[in-house]
Amino acid sequence: MSHEVVLPAGWPRPKGYANAVVARGRQLYIAGMIGWDAEQQFHSDDFGDQVRQALKNVADVLKEAGAKPENIVRMTWYVTDKREYLAAGRQVGQAFRELIGHYDIAMTAVEVKALIEDRAKVEIEVTAVLPD
């Protein structure tokens, strides 16, 4: 693993993310990935389906760079509807476990008014650190 989780003494372990991560190595910055495929086509307007596709897109970019999901140290999620995100929690968690596999990632989720692509419901930005 190219990073370690930082958790101050006495703080409870966050569920589904890390508060902070320390990493050393080559850095990979992945632009916001949305729920369309490589041909920029949406196959669903379902929130969970779009998350799965966005995470698949992240995994594809990681692979192309010679990285793996365990190299991810930071994610920022932009969602257009907080309630829809929370309602899809089980589906989102399943896709996350299958495609990313670990939660030792400093994560932020923000509700936004809209995303640039009208059909997009989620956009996920990623920073990964690969061993030197």
Image (tube, rainbow, N blue to C red):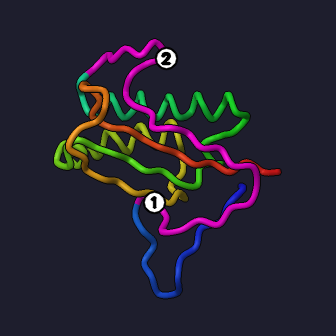
Disc 1/disc 2 C-alpha distance (Å): 27 Å
Check the image and name the residue furthest to the front: 116
Viewer-nearest of discs 1 and 2: 2
* The disc label shown at residue 38, or none: 2
Q: Is residue 78 above or below residue 12?
A: above
Q: Nearer the viewer, residue 105 or 116?
A: 116
Q: Is residue 34 above or below residue 105?
A: above
Name the quarter where the N terminus is drawn. bottom right
Was residue 109 drawn as part of the magenta stretch in this picture?
no
Query: Dot 1: what SS?
Result: loop
69 to the left or right of 111: right
Quarter of the image where one finds residue 29:
top right
Check contact, mark 1 vs mark 2: CB within 8 A.
Answer: no
Q: Which residues are magenta?
A: 16-44
Q: Looking at the picture, which amino acid does disc 1 mark?
A: Tyr
Check the image and name the residue furthest to the right: 132
Residue drawn at x 25%, y 45% as measured from the top left: 85
Indicate the position of residue 132 as horizontal and vertical percent values: 83, 51
Indicate the position of residue 82 as horizontal and vertical percent values: 20, 49
Was residue 43 drawn as part of the magenta stretch in this picture?
yes
Indicate the position of residue 93 as horizontal and vertical percent values: 38, 45
Residue drawn at x 66%, y 40% as measured from the top left: 68
Q: Which residue is mark 1?
A: 17
Residue drawn at x 30%, y 53% as measured from the top left: 110
Quarter of the image where one finds residue 104:
bottom right
Query: Dot 2: what SS?
Result: loop
Q: Residues within 10 Å of mark 1 (few under 14, many from 20)?
A: some
